[in-house]
Image: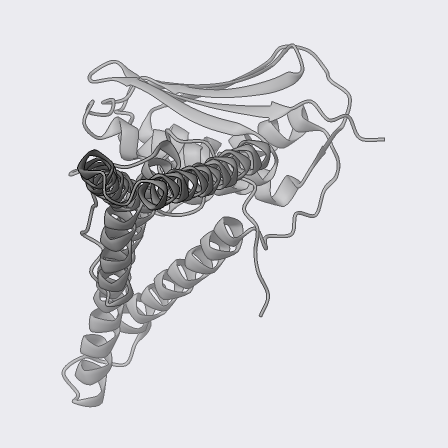
Amino acid sequence: MQRHFFRHHPPGYPANEPFPPRDPHASRAMRHRFFARLFALFVFFFVFACGGLAAFIWLIANLISAPNSPDSAFLFRMLAFIFLFGGLILVGRGLSRVALPIGDLVQAAGRVAEGDYDVQIAERGPREVRALAHAFNSMAARLQATDEQRRNLLADITHELRTPLTIIQGNLEGLLDGMYPRDDAHLAPILDETRVLARVIDDLRMLALAESGALQLQKEPTDLAMLITETAASFQPQADAAGIALNVEIARAAPPLDLDPARLRQVLENIIANALHFTPRGGTIALKCFSEHDRVLIETRDSGAGIAPEDLPHIFERFYKARDSRGTGLGLAIAKSLVTAHGGEISAQSEVGIGTTIQIALPRVVAS
């Protein structure tokens, strides 16, 4: 079975935690400490047993040398009892510190295996056992988040596919029953909805490829300034019709960069389309491109309605849509995946009533 290794955060993984979750050298050091402490525990019990055996032999020898001495018999019985009782306490306490947390872990693992991800265990015992319990709790929490995300994804996909299918089915039934004439006015909506279905399916496929690390970029020497200018020009008629000023500002000519122009154009189209949708008549949209150290920054700033603070952290999530948003909620999620595939980052800043700024930071990899 083919395995995919994520260079970035996979679905369901907390964004505020590093991925991979642990440095392999730190894990190796923790394993060494665990086995060292386990070895020390066995050495302690071995020395304890040898010392106890030596004391037992010494007491037997004294008892034999003075068989009729009541003091020797009493001393032997008392020391033997103390030694046995103390040994049992030490052994029981040492084993319980390891056995009880391990028992909790085994029981919780069984619940996870049965599909119950809402399980957490107490982090107790030696340091290594506590680290194991903490890792298990983190794993269970991530599994629960992933399972919830999977259910939400299925529900969202069902909703997005059901709407165009319902429209297509209703129009076809009307045409077949003779309720609608078979003309372009009634056939065109059916074609439009098939395009909506195709776009949703293509978006889902691209998002799945990007998040699994299987998306292949066709990089080539790309004039980024020309790409931005051409993409903005394709939206100029739509901006003029909406009464919105669409401006492009390129800091200075840069050498061709090693990029996938088709994928980066798709990112820009998603961002500009969103800006046009939320910017009112008379507003402005400004595209800027400039260099900063070893990165190239692309900013899209609009004077639109802005994004509510509670919505802003989620705008790059799959199927997430604000209350007044249209579309499938996949555009910005795809944009983030494509930017990440280029080794870059995308971020957003917004103020309600003032506007939104989307910034793309790409590594400055000059084409050879």
List x then y, in percent, for residue 299: 48, 19
List x then y, in percent, for residue 208: 47, 56
Residue closer to the observer: 110 or 92: 92
In the picture as drawn, the residue positioned furthest to the front comes out as: 68
| Image quadrant in which you'd find residue 344 | top right
Q: Is residue 363 left or right of residue 73?
A: right
Above or below residue 205? Residue 62 is above
| Image quadrant in which you'd find residue 3 | bottom right
In the picture as drawn, the residue positioned furthest to the bottom comes out as: 177
- Give the quarter of the figure containing the C terminus: top right
Residue closer to the observer: 41 or 237: 41
- Please name the colour scheme applied to the rendered image: one colour
List x then y, in percent, for residue 12: 35, 46
**Residue at image location 58% in from the left, 43% down from the top:** 263
Q: Is residue 59 left or right of residue 231?
A: left
**Residue at image location 60% in from the left, 27% down from the top:** 229
Above or below residue 354? Residue 36 is below
Residue closer to the observer: 100 or 105: 100
List x then y, in percent, for residue 196: 35, 61
Q: Is residue 207 visible?
A: yes
Above or below residue 111? Residue 256 is above
Q: Is residue 343 left or right of residue 166?
A: right
Q: Is residue 131 left or right of residue 106?
A: right
Q: Is residue 21 visible?
A: no
**Residue at image location 66% in from the left, 41% down from the top:** 260
Above or below residue 188? Residue 253 is above
Q: Exactly how many numbered labels are in the figure? A: 0
